Image (cartoon, grey):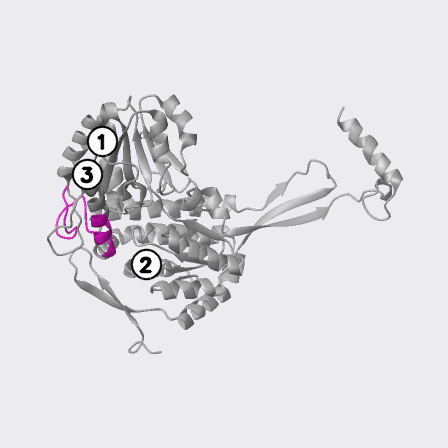
Amino acid sequence: MNSSTQARLTLVEPASGNAIAELPLTSPAEVQAAVTRASKAQPHWASMPCSERAKIIHKWRNSLISNGEALARALSRENGKPIHEAWFHELVPLCGALTWVAEEAPQLLAERSVSLRWMKQYKCNITARARGQCAIIAPYNFPVLIPFADAAAALAAGCSVIVKPSELTPLIALTVAKLAHEAGLDSALLQVLPGGPETACALLDADVDEVTFTGSLDHGREVARHCAERLIPCTLELGGKASLVVFEDADVESAATATVFGALANSGQSCIAVERVIVHRRLRRALVESVVQRVKALRQGNPLHAEVDLGALTAPASMNRLKLQVDDAIAQGARLLCGGHPLATPGQYFAPTVLDECTPTMRVVCEESFGPIIPIVSVESTGEAIDVANSGASELAAYLFGRDETRLRALAPNLRAGHVLLNDVLWSYVCPEIPFGGQHQSGFGVVHGREGLLSHTRPVHLGTTRLKLPDMLGIAFPYSEKARSFLQRTLRLVTR
């Protein structure tokens, strides 16, 4: 199929609603061809010393820094986020992730010896062997940081990588990959395939060796089914409903500041965003007033035209979903204190919203919003707060606020979350040293950290015999009662 007849993907600028580009969708045949190219290039890449792979990743990072402002503006235009967030929430953390991977991978992936407790006659070495072809299916909310931090780890481990970006944000992914190629990475080792669900399904059905998926619960289940049929590993990050719990001894102003930033950064389009605030009734009024005051001071608009705090929502479908959640909450008795509606301007803007007097059964409290809404629930006790935090959508993250850190540490294990922060919000994901993953239906497996790096490898054991034991010890044929008796006497000696 030539480009003139191939199905096309029209990209729209969220801040204005204007079309900005058109790309051909990657066909299933093209997906398979990309995987074939990757499989041919990957063995040589894996055979290189990890230190040599790390040098190319370093050069890629340097290129990202050199092109930072252009990348930030392109990211903002395609995704809708403020320029500030493009820099601080994506480009800077990605450069940090590439630096960490390049510097730590040679040591973390090095062959290691294992000392055996009993069988001292054997020598064992464990090598981390690259899995092969890594497929990354990425979301639209962090279209630079999420796929390419994961890609850097897979590349450092010796894998080839094929990224299927969100159909809403493929341009920036293509640009970042091109910079990697210009830094010396074989283009077959990092490929970006624009497309929608059909492209993703074709990639899952192709001959890849592992899958890393970030997205919704329903789509995550589909990915898991595909991988189960092919018996290949997958890492799933499926979001959740992160709670910020404000106990009766918390500093109200600190909790309010964290609430607004945690809920509204990236317009709430984050898997670890504060999606509900659970506050002790004694602090409720003071917290609500402080939150509303801060929200009303935020600037919202086109990030390419002015310095703003909130940009546009990336996905058009978000607008209706958020309005339905707000209307449902109001119908059930919640008080709308600000926002609650799309802006009457071109572009995909939803006014930052605060809802007070919410209850745990409201959709806005128990279903993921993925938008700029702050629902506030008041509780009477610590136990009730924990119960609400663990209700509804499974959690990837949770945040506890109070002056007694010892108490917070004791309560943290009771939360159904993969990440718990005390008196702060959001920073888990941007630290490449920390393994990042959720619990229950928020997914399984981790990215980042030593664990995330090693997930792109298979441990392979190489064993050698240093000392051949006498036949009388009875390990090999022929078996005998005499050998067993000798073994039993030896075991009794070591247990005295």
Where disc 1 sits, the SS reads helix
Q: Is 315 colored magenta in this rendering?
A: yes
Q: Is residue 408 left or right of residue 300?
A: right
Image coordinates of residue 475 in percent, x first then y, are 81, 44
Res 187 visible: no
Amino acid bearing label 3: Val
Quadrant (top left, top right, bottom left, bottom right) of the C terminus: top right
Pick the residue in front: 293 or 470.
293
In the picture of the structure, the residue carrying the numbered disc 2 is: 166
Mark 3: few, some, or many residues within 10 Å (few <14, many ≥20)?
many
Q: Amino acid at mark 1?
A: Ala
Residue placed under numbered mark 1 in the picture: 256
> Is residue 152 shown in magenta?
no
Q: Amino acid at mark 2?
A: Ser
- Compared to residue 404, the image places residue 68 above or below, namely below
SS class, disc 3: strand
Q: Is residue 352 left or right of residue 33?
A: left
Q: Residue at x 81, y 31 (%)?
A: 490
Mark yes or no: residue 169 visible.
yes
Mark 1 Cα-neighbour bin, 10 Å: few <14, some 14–19, many ≥20: many
Magenta: predominant secondary structure element?
Answer: loop
Name the front one of labels 2 and 3.
3
Instruction: Name the image quarter holding residue 387.
Output: top left
Between circles 3 and 1, the one closer to the viewer is 3
Q: Nearer the viewer, residue 310 or 147?
A: 310
Labels 1 and 2: the sequence-earlier one: 2
The part of the chain drawn in magenta is: 297-324
Q: How far from the left and from the top, in percent, is residue 489?
A: 83, 31
Task: Check the image and name the residue furthest to the front.
Answer: 332
Report x, y in % for residue 389.
35, 35
Which numbered tag is attached to residue 354?
Answer: 3
